[in-house]
Image: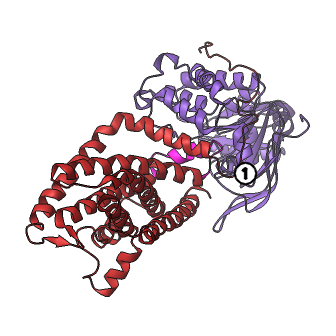
Chain colours: A red, B purple
Amino acid sequence: MSATTTAPDRGGSLTVGVRQRRFEPGVVAAIVYREWRVFRRVWFSTAFGSIVEPIVFFVGFGFGFGALISEVAGLSYLEFMATGTIAIGIMFSALFPGLINGYSRRTERHLYDGQLAAPVTVAEIVAGESLWNGLRVSVVAMVTVGVAFAFGVRMGPGVVFIPLIAIISGFGLCATGAAFAAKLRSWHGVDIVVGGLIAPMFVVAGTFFPLDGLPRFAELFGRVNPLYHCVELLRAAAFGGYGLWQVLGHLGAVLLFNLLAWLVAVRFVRQALID
Amino acid sequence: MSILPAIRLASVVKRFGDLTAVDHLDLEVPRGSCFGLLGPNGAGKSTTMRMLTGQAEADEGIVEVLGHRLPGASRHARAVSGVVPQVDNLDDELTVEENLAVTARLQRIPRERRQEAIARGLRIARLSERAEAATRSLSGGMRRRLLIARGLVHAPELVLLDEPTVGLDPQVRQQLWSTIAEIQAEGATVLMSTHYIEEAERLCDEVAVMHLGRVVAQGPPATLIASHVGREVLEVDGAPPTLARVEHEARSAGLRTRRSGTSVAVLDAEQLDGQAWAQGERRKPTLEDVFVVLTGEELA
């Protein structure tokens, strides 16, 4: 038996006097810090995906459809689909981590149990992971802007708002993934989420074609789809031509969706973790 | 403040559907003690631990940790308690040091004391040399030490250990025992659930034996042994017919017996005086004898 284990120092708990309010931004920062530490080692896969995916869309849709359609909603088709591609990048890069990580961290890696042993709440974990993914997809969005530039798309000075739009939209989409992850009983459930949620969300959002021409029910779905409001904000930022109230309307819709997604995710994840 | 127990459970009930996992449980853990929660699988130990860590909420009764009433003040309780779970939930995407650094941040240890906390964790885990190593590269024993250290970075007043040495080889187990003894020497209260009787006997000042969701006996190990199984045990080996006869004779003499494998243990054997059937090895009773008498179940 080894007697070399060092006794911890005396002197009382290091958390004496630390505030314990219902929601502590410091915990959200700690969750973001954890994600950042991991990201420093795995950034390449994010970078690779965020460069290759838009190139595929530009070549396929841009040149494929672009040859058939000259103009959509006052924009060239390449401009129209460029903002759609940014939005899709935001969705995939935020919703999938919310879903996949949410499930594996809860069921296979028990990561949340470890975090919740500290004075941490589910609300803070969901907020931290969603905020992180928002930050991460803001980079993904700007990479897509670069790819669009390479394909000849010229955006206006409002392009500086795109990272912010990505952060805000990414937050709610990640929380949406987390909410569904909390209800998954096995990996098979991912098929349901992809087919039933992700596919319609990314197609019926005014990403590659406008909502106007769609059947009424599809158009209605599109109007409540947060990705539609995200892509409209992106178009307003990149090319202008939107009124202030229009922009505020879309922003309000995204923020409202974020609040709902976060609340639902917190409720579901809590139910899944705490007996 | 030392009058208040570190943990107080009063008439606590926890149900899962039709199953009552914890059934009007009363338990007080004195401050500064090392307290063992013993019981066979399904006795309610894990559920009790989960209620104390905030992972489960009681349906009825009072749960207090260091004076904080749960679940309402769970956050305050978790700030001053450290949890070492049974299931390894180290963060495999991080290094050893990052595991401790993230925990220090989640605990919101003030920035100027964070390095001290991380160093403390590395020291307890005895992994200072491997601070930069990927957590997934550690051996089973190292992982368990890191798991314990992670629960201690903030120098908690109460440490909750759920089956801390399950599945470890004897050498690693002994290392962990010395760590646990040091935590207690530091002044922290330790509550550990275990089904290794030897662990409880060696480390705990006081143990509670749980059965079917309740505490059926509580006290210092020596007191429990003296009051439940007497001063001496007679261990008789033999073939099943011999054992059956010994059991029959012992019960006729008003004594309790315990069958395990190829032997029968007769309790309170000091009351026997040279009966022909009572031939075997005499030994001191153990906490395990108490456990079996109280729960009717053998430990694996």
Q: Residue furthest left?
A: A67
Residue A254 visible from this viewpoint: yes
Q: Is A264 placed above or below B179 here? A: below
Relative to residue A17, is residue A136 drawn left or right?
A: left
Q: Quadrant of the C terminus of chain A?
A: bottom right
The tally of labels here is 1
In the rendered image, residue A110 lying in the magenta stretch gets the answer: yes
Q: What is the span of residues highlighted in magenta in the rendered image?
A: A107-121
Q: Residue A113 in the image: x percent, y percent?
A: 56, 47
In the rendered image, residue B113 lying in the magenta stretch gets the answer: no
Q: Residue A42 in the image: x percent, y percent?
A: 34, 37
Q: Identify which residue, B208 or B267, lies in the foreground.
A: B208
Which residue appears at 40% of the width and 28% of the height? B137
Q: Residue A85 in the image: x percent, y percent?
A: 25, 59
Q: Quadrant of the N terminus of chain A?
A: top right
Using the image, name the chain to which the residue with label 1 belongs: B
Q: Identify which residue, B70 or B46, lies in the foreground.
A: B70
Which residue appears at 41% of the width and 32% of the height? B136
Residue indicated by mark 1: B211
Relative to residue A117, is residue A67 drawn left or right?
A: left
Q: Residue B273 in the image: x percent, y percent?
A: 85, 31
Q: Is B232 placed above or below A207 here? A: above
Residue B150's quadrant in the figure?
top right
Q: Residues within 10 Å of mark 1 (few under 14, many from 20)?
A: many
Amino acid at dot 1:
His
